[in-house]
Structures are given as structure tokens and as C-alpha cells.
Image (cartoon, rainbow, N blue to C red):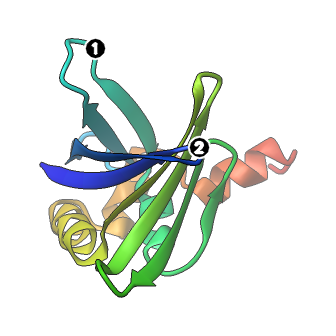
Amino acid sequence: MLPLRISLGEEVVGEVRTRFRFDAARPYEVLLTFHLGRPDEADWVFSRELLRDGLRSLSGQGDVKLWPAYCPCHGSTLHLALESPHGSALLEVSKPKVQDWLDRTYALVSETAEQAHGPTDAQLSELLAGGR
């Protein structure tokens, strides 16, 4: 469980307990579960590739955007901007902790082995753009 600092709009809310989850049967995706202190937890699913790229530079478009940052008070961080019809949130988490977690997922299922489980982001983009 990782605490993420969260802002909703201009208002800083505080921290939300979050669990990064990975299923080796679906290695191309990660699931982020927000434990909000009530029965209906909020889940976000996005590609493991998006998370990997977001640890290095601005990554994503649409509902999920990620980018690395450095803050004097929190050190090396990963920012996650989430958009939904219900609102938006900006989250910040320890980049080294997310990197360690992501490295463990690649130890379970390598990037090469992941390709046997479904299309990559590049393949999906090509398909959606009308490619073969």
C-alpha cells in the first residue's frame, strides 16, 4: 500500500492509500486501487508501458497522464493526472517506490513475454489509426 498525495482541482485534499496491482495473466496492464475508506473503492486500469514511460518523461493522453518530477520536500516523484466524467485529480507518489514495484512486475513477466499476452500500445495505436 502506497500513500499518494492528492489534489482535486485547486484544493489539496491530503493523502489517499493506494495499491498498485499486477496480474501476470494480464501483464500489459496495471491496476491502481484507491482505498477511500468506504466500500466502493475506485479503480483505474492503464498500461504497464504507460507507467514505465511516465517514470522517464511525460506519457499518456486522455484520461491518464504521468510524468516524473522533483520536489525539494518529497524528492523524486511521479505525478499522475486522472480525468473522468466525475472530475479530475492530480496525484503524487514516490518515484523510487513505484520504480521498485514496476521492476518486480518485469521480473515476473518480461516485456518480451508480455507481447504473447496481447497487443502493445504501439500495436493498438496503429490499429486505431487504420493500420494493418
Residue 38: percent from left, percent from top: 21, 16
Q: Earlier in the sequence, mark 2 or mark 1?
A: 2
Q: In the figure, residue 94 lies in which quadrant?
A: bottom left
Q: In the figure, residue 19 lies in which quadrant?
A: top left
Q: Residue at x 39, y 82 (%)?
A: 71
Closer to us: 99 or 25: 99
Closer to us: 66 or 72: 72
Residue 3: percent from left, percent from top: 20, 53
Give the residue type that dot 1 points to.
Answer: Asp
As drawn, 32 above or below 3: above
Real-space Cα separation, disc 2 to disc 1, in angstroms:
22 Å
As drawn, 93 above or below 25: below
The furthest residue to the right: 130
Tell whether 60 sits left or right of 79. Answer: right
Give the residue type that dot 2 points to.
Answer: Gly
Q: Residue at x 31, y 74 (%)?
A: 95
Residue 119: percent from left, percent from top: 54, 48
Q: Nearer the viewer, mark 2 or mark 1?
A: 2
Q: Residue at x 36, y 67 (%)?
A: 111
Residue on which the image places disc 1? 40
Disc 1 is placed on an element classified as loop
Residue 9 has which mark? 2
Closer to us: 3 or 9: 9
Tell whether 57 sits left or right of 73. Answer: right
Tell whether 104 sits left or right of 87. Answer: left
